[in-house]
C-alpha cells in the first residue's frame, strides 16, 4: 500500500499529515482503491454488485428509451389520470387544482408570516429559497413536466401555470396577512375560509356527478386524501381511548383495534363491496368509492391508533406531572402537553402508514372494481389498437412512476416537517 | 391560629412539635396523620406538619426517606392513603374541584425541570395562565416577561428549553410555577440535577422569592440554603418526621440521635 493511504483502523489515533512529496496526488485511482478494493472481500463485492448494477441500469435504460413502446401511455393519458370523468366537466378539475394551489399558498404564507411576527422565522435570501424549493420538489416537477409534454395540449400547461401563479400570489398575500396582528373577526373569517375551501371545491367538482364517473390516478389521490384526513383524528381518539381510565371506553377501543388489525384490508374491501348488499338495500348503499373511503379510514385508523399510542407512551411522566402541577385539567394536559410531543415523535411511522394507505388504494381497483390507475393500466392493454402486444410492462411502469413520485414527495416533506418541529428541543 | 401565642413562649422547646409554626398568620399547609403506601411499602408514617403563611420550611433527610413523597402529596401528584391534607383551607379529597383548586394555589419545581420541550420559554410560562386563568395572550405574555425579568433571564424568552443551560431551565421552571400566582411554592430537590456552577443562580432566585414573602416547602441537600433561608428545618427518615426546628438550633444542637448521625455524615 502506498504512503498516501492512511489506514483507517479501529484505533482513533490522528495521524500526522504525511509528506507525500510533490508527485503524489489523491486522484481517482486512490479513491477507488481506498473505497472499493481495500480488501479482497471488498473487491469481490464491488465486482459482483457493480456488474449487477450495470446490467440492471442497462436494461432499464433500453426499456425506457429504446424498446419501450410508450404510445399507449400518450394515447390514454387522460384515461390514466382522470378515468372516464365527463369531458364536459374537466374544466372543474382544472379550477379545483388552481383553487387548491391557492389554498396551499395561503396557508404556507400565513404560517411563515406568523413565524416572522413571532421572531422564529428563518430569513433566507431569495436565491436560497429557490434552491430550497428545487431541492424539495425537483422530482415532482420533473414528472409533472413529463406529463405536460406527453399531454401535448395547451390546457394542462395553462392549468399548471395558473396554479403556480395562484400559489405564488396567495403565498405573498398570506405572508403579508400573517405578519400583521389581525383583529379577531378577520382571524375567524380567515380560518373559516381556509376550512371551507376544500369541501367547497369538492362539492363544486361533484355537483351533479357521481363518484362512479371518477377514475384513474385522480381516484387514487382522492381516496387517499379523504381517508388520510378522516383516519388521523379517528386514530388519535382510538389511541387516547385505549389509554382511557374508563374501562368501557378502553375495552371498546381495544376490541376495535384488534379486530380491524387482524383482518386483511383486501377482505374488508371485498366485504364492503359484496356483503354490504346483504344488509342494506342496494338503492340505499353508498357508492363504491364512498365505501372504499370508509374501509380505508377504519382500517388505517386502527394502525394509526397503535402508532400514536406508542408516541403517547414515549412521553416522560414528568411532563404530565408538570402539566398537573401548573393546574391544567386532564383534557388540557393531553391537548397542550402530551399530544403535540407524542405526535411529533411518531411522524416517521405515521407518514409510513399514510404512504402505505396511498399505495393500498390500488386494492380498491381489484377488490371493488373501481376504475383506478392500476385497473386502467391493465384495461388499456386490451384496447383494439394495443391488444396482444404485451404492453402491460409499459403501463404498469407508468403507474409505478405515478405512485412513486407522490410517495417520495410525501416522504421528503415528512422529513422536513420532522426537522422543522424538532427546533431546539433536543 | 391558637398555636401562635404558645409558640413565642416556647420556641426553644418545640423542636419535635411539627405542628408548631414559626412565621405568622394562618397555616397555609396542614398535614395531619398522613400515611402513604406504595404497595406494601409505607412511604409516609403519620406525618404531621403545619406550614404558616410566608414561612420557608426546608425538608432534609437521606434518600428514600419520603421527603419528595410528602411534598408530592401536597399538590396531589401522589394520593395519600390516610390522614388529612389541607392547603389554604381546601382539603384534598377525591373531589376533582378541590384538587384543581389546590393545584392552582401551589406551584411546583421539579428536580429534572420538566419544562415542555415543544414550547418556547415564554409559552411554557404563559400556557397555564392562558388556558386555566383565561388570561388574554397579550396580558399573559406581559406577565411572562415580568417573571422572566424576576428570574433574570428575559433575553431567553423566545428560545426553547433545549437551548438553555440547566440553571436557566430551572429558573424558567420557577417562573412557570409563579405564573399561576400561587400562594405556596413546592421545590423537589431543585438543584440536584444541576452542575455545581449553576446551583447558586437557582438558590439565589429562591432566596429572592423567600424574601418576597412566598410560602415555601423545599426538599434539598443544600445545607447552606437551609441555614440561611429556612424558618424551620424538618428532618425525615424512613417515612417519618424525626425532628423539626429553627436552623440555628437544628444544626448546632440537634436533639435526636438519628439527626446527629445524619448531620455528621453530610457536614
Image (cartoon, rainbow, N blue to C red):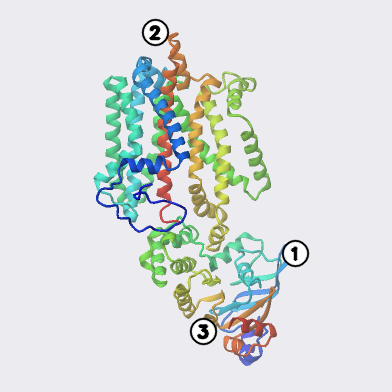
Tell me if mark 3 has few (under 14), some (14-19) or many (20+) residues whose alpha carbon lies within 10 angstroms of its own: few
Count of marks overlaid on the render: 3
Outermost top residue: A384
- Please report the residue visible at 45 percent of the width from the left and 52 percent of the height from the top: A9
- Residue located beneath label 2 in the image: A385
For disc 2, the chain is A
Q: Mark 3 points at which residue?
A: B228
Whether the residues at callouts 3 and 2 have beta carbons within 8 Å, the answer is: no
| Residue at position x 54%, y 31% in the image | A296
Tag 3 secondary structure: helix
For residue B249, say whether it is visible: yes
Determine whether the residue tagged by mark 1 lies in a helix, strand or loop.
loop
Which is nearer the eye, B144 or A141?
Answer: A141
Residue A127 tag number: none
Foreground mark, 3 or 2? 2
Could you say where residue B112 lies in the image, as x and y percent from the top left? 53, 65
Q: In which quarter of the image is residue A120?
A: bottom left
Whole-Å distance between the Cαs marked 1 and 2? 83 Å
User: Which chain hosts label 1?
Assistant: B
- Residue A407: percent from left, percent from top: 44, 33
Q: Earlier in the sequence, mark 3 or mark 1?
A: 1
Chain identity of mark 3:
B
Task: From the image, tell me which residue sits under label 1.
Answer: B40
Check the image and report above or below for B146 versus A122.
below
Amino acid at each position: 500500500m502506498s504512503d498516501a493511504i492512511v489506514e483507517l483502523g479501529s484505533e482513533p489515533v490522528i495521524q500526522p499529515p504525511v509528506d507525500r512529496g510533490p508527485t503524489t496526488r489523491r486522484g481517482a485511482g486512490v479513491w477507488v482503491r481506498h473505497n472499493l478494493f481495500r480488501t479482497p472481500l471488498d473487491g469481490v463485492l464491488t465486482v459482483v454488485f457493480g456488474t449487477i448494477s450495470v446490467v440492471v441500469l442497462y436494461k432499464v435504460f433500453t426499456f425506457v428509451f429504446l424498446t419501450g413502446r410508450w404510445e399507449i401511455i400518450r394515447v390514454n393519458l387522460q384515461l390514466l389520470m382522470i378515468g372516464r370523468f365527463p369531458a364536459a366537466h374537466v374544466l372543474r378539475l382544472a379550477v379545483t387544482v388552481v383553487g387548491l394551489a391557492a389554498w396551499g399558498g395561503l396557508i404556507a404564507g400565513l404560517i411563515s408570516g406568523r413565524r416572522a411576527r413571532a421572531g422564529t422565522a428563518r430569513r433566507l435570501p431569495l436565491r436560497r429559497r429557490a434552491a430550497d424549493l428545487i431541492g424539495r420538489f425537483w422530482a415532482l416537477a420533473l414528472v409533472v413536466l413529463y406529463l405536460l409534454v406527453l399531454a401535448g395540449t395547451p390546457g394542462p400547461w395553462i392549468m399548471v401555470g395558473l396554479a403556480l401563479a395562484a400559489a405564488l400570489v396567495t403565498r405573498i398575500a398570506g405572508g403579508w396577512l400573517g405578519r400583521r396582528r389581525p383583529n379577531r373577526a378577520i382571524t375567524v373569517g380567515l380560518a373559516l375560509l381556509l376550512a371551507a375551501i376544500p369541501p367547497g371545491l369538492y362539492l363544486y367538482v361533484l355537483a351533479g356527478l357521481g363518484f362512479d364517473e371518477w377514475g384513474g390516478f385522480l381516484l387514487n389521490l382522492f381516496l387517499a386524501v379523504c381517508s388520510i384526513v378522516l383516519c388521523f383524528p379517528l386514530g388519535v381518539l382510538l389511541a387516547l381511548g385505549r389509554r382511557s381510565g374508563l374501562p368501557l371506553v378502553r375495552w371498546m377501543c381495544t376490541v376495535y383495534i384488534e379486530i380491524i388489525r387482524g383482518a386483511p384490508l383486501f377482505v374488508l374491501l371485498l366485504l364492503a363491496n359484496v356483503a354490504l348488499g346483504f344488509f342494506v338495500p342496494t338503492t340505499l348503499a353508498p357508492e363504491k368509492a364512498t365505501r372504499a373511503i370508509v374501509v380505508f379510514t377504519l382500517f388505517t385508523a386502527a394502525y394509526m391508533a397503535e402508532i400514536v399510542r406508542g408516541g403517547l407512551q414515549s412521553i416522560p411522566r414528568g411532563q404530565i406531572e408538570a402539566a398537573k402541577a401548573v393546574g391544567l385539567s386532564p383534557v388540557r394536559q393531553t391537548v397542550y402537553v402530551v399530544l403535540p410531543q407524542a405526535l411529533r415523535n411518531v411522524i416517521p411511522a405515521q407518514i409510513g402508514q399514510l404512504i402505505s394507505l396511498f399505495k393500498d388504494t390500488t386494492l380498491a381497483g381489484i377488490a371493488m372494481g373501481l376504475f383506478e390507475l392500476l385497473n386502467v393500466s391493465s384495461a388499456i392493454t386490451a384496447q383494439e389498437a394495443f391488444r396482444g402486444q404485451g404492453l402491460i410492462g409499459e403501463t404498469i411502469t407508468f403507474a409505478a412512476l405515478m405512485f412513486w413520485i407522490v410517495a417520495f414527495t410525501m416522504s421528503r416533506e415528512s422529513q422536513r416537517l420532522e426537522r422543522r418541529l424538532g427546533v431546539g428541543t433536543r | 391560629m391558637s398555636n401562635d401565642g404558645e409558640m413565642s413562649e416556647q420556641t426553644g422547646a418545640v423542636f419535635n412539635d411539627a405542628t408548631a409554626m414559626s412565621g405568622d398568620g394562618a397555616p397555609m399547609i396542614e398535614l395531619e396523620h398522613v400515611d402513604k403506601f406504595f404497595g406494601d411499602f409505607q412511604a409516609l408514617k403519620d406525618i404531621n406538619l403545619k406550614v404558616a403563611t410566608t414561612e420557608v420550611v426546608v425538608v432534609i433527610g437521606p434518600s428514600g426517606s419520603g421527603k419528595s413523597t410528602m411534598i408530592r402529596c401536597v399538590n396531589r401528584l401522589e394520593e395519600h392513603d390516610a390522614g388529612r391534607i389541607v392547603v389554604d383551607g381546601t382539603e384534598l379529597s377525591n373531589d376533582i374541584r378541590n384538587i384543581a383548586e389546590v393545584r392552582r394555589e401551589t406551584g411546583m419545581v421539579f428536580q429534572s425541570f420538566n419544562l415542555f420541550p415543544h414550547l418556547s420559554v415564554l409559552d411554557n410560562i404563559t400556557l397555564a395562565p392562558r388556558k386555566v386563568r383565561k388570561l388574554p395572550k397579550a396580558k399573559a405574555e406581559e406577565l411572562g416577561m415580568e417573571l422572566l425579568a424576576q428570574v433574570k433571564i428575559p433575553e431567553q424568552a423566545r428560545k426553547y428549553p433545549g437551548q438553555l443551560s440547566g440553571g436557566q431551565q430551572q429558573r424558567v421552571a420557577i417562573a412557570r410555577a409563579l405564573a399561576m400566582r400561587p400562594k405556596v411554592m413546592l421545590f423537589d430537590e431543585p438543584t440536584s440535577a444541576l452542575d455545581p456552577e449553576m446551583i447558586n443562580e437557582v438558590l439565589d432566585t429562591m432566596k429572592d422569592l423567600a424574601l418576597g414573602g412566598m410560602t415555601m416547602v423545599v426538599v434539598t441537600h443544600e445545607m447552606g440554603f437551609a441555614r440561611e433561608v429556612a424558618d424551620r428545618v424538618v428532618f425525615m427518615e424512613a417515612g417519618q418526621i424525626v425532628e423539626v426546628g429553627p436552623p440555628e438550633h437544628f444544626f448546632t444542637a440537634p436533639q435526636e440521635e438519628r439527626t446527629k448521625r445524619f448531620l455528621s455524615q453530610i457536614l
